Amino acid sequence: MTALTPTQIDALSELGNIGASHAATSLSQMLMGQIEMTVPSVEIVDLADIYKHVTDDISALVIFQMQGEIEQGGYIIFLMPLHSAIRMTNTMLGMSDESREINEMDESALNEIGNIMVSAFLDATAELLGVVMLPSPPTLVIDMGHAAIQQLLVEVACDVNEVVFFHTKLVCNQYAINGDLLMLPDINTLSRILEMMDNLLNAHS
Amino acid sequence: MHIAELPGSLWMDINHPRSDPRAIVIGIGDYHVGTEPMTSIGLGSCIGLILHDTRLDIGGMAHIMLPESGGKRDRPGKYADTAVEILIKDLSKKGCTPKTLQAKLVGGAQMFANFSGNLSIGLRNVEAIKELLKKSGISIKGEDIGGNKGRTVYYCPAEGFQVRVRRADGSCSEL
């Protein structure tokens, strides 16, 4: 894979920053609590090192494929440790039992929350780039984070050994909820996004 | 030392594959051959292929992602064909022969319907590896494959051919 220049990394983190801020705001509104967000990191990660970024702890992952004018553009994933996911739906639905098993109501709540956040993420980034980007319907997976991400990598990293990995952490201290917003763009999508960012930067300089 | 004096963090749950901090983590597309403990965490559709020589108590593990390399040689552990080949090659350098080697397979799950509608890559991985092992004359001594849950695998060649598997639902077993 061709290395990204520092300017391209900057541009991509800024794009991720705008998207993630909108996603965090929508989560904050749904939880009626304050959300803290880390500055998104954009890294080129070797497949063999993915385990350093995603653990095999049991997690809830809401997975979306990026669609719209960018076809099969890669994936956006909202990943939460399972305990956090249950605390989040408890908070929203006014329940308190944290040791219960995950149920259908949690699952549809997680899908819906993920949908709202990721739609906000894509709306904001697409508006900046001047294209239409839509999330696919969500796929909810309750499993080891690494195992689920690995199955997605089969789709985006068949021919390459490195992936571009966007990563932002979201934390709500008030309810002890935390999650990760991840984006794994397809290599073709990435070059299209970079092209659009270049045009955008040139238009303003 | 009296056992009670050990601080809690030193206690090891032998059933928990990641509790061994010495274990070499074999990432996606990676492989390793030797006597050290090895682990592959969070196998989804990937396969953890373990070859073991019971005479010498050495072995190797590969974290295989795809069934066919199509001629690519840059990442031998990533594809079934190149991974089987390189494991056998590196193990022969240490005195093993296909006759003394045995195999175990872990992984190959289909965790969710693929977005592209591809048929289960996990099962294709399993089929490819089994075919290659058969051709090389290596017998399969155990497997925990298929299903729809992720797995973490741990293997310590020095302890013999014992492979520990922890599944996403928390259950553990030994192969």
Image: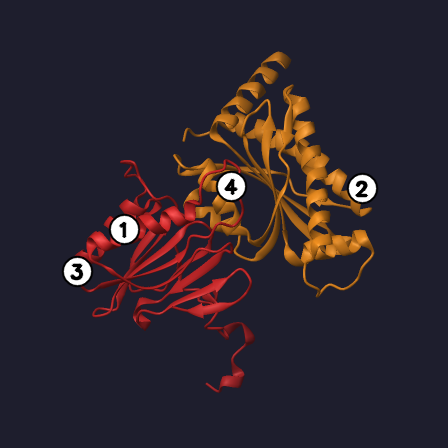
Chain colours: A orange, B red
Q: CA distance from mark 2 to mark 3?
A: 63 Å
**Left or right: A137 in relation to A189:** right
| Chain letter of disc 4 in the image | B
Foreground mark, 3 or 1, reads: 1
Give coordinates of residue A18: x percent, y percent.
68, 31
Badge 2 crowding class, 10 Å Cα cut-off, few under 14, some 14 to 19, many 20 or more, is few
Q: Mark 4 highlights which residue?
A: B114
Q: Do the residues at pointers 3 and 1 share their chain?
A: yes
Quarter containing the C terminus of chain A? top right
Q: Is residue A190 above or below residue B6?
A: above
Q: Is residue A163 above or below residue A90?
A: above
Q: Mark 2 highlights which residue?
A: A29
Residue displayed at 44% across by 67% down: B20
Query: Can residue B29 be seen here?
Result: no
Q: Amino acid at mark 3?
A: Thr
| Chain letter of disc 3 in the image | B
Residue displayed at 57% across by 19% down: A196
Q: Amino acid at mark 1?
A: Glu
Query: Which element carries disc 3, helix, strand or loop?
Result: loop
**Left or right: B2 in relation to B36:** right
Q: Amino acid at mark 4?
A: Asn
Is label 4 in contact with label 1 (beta carbons under 8 Å)?
no
| Chain letter of disc 2 in the image | A
Q: Mark 3 highlights which residue?
A: B97
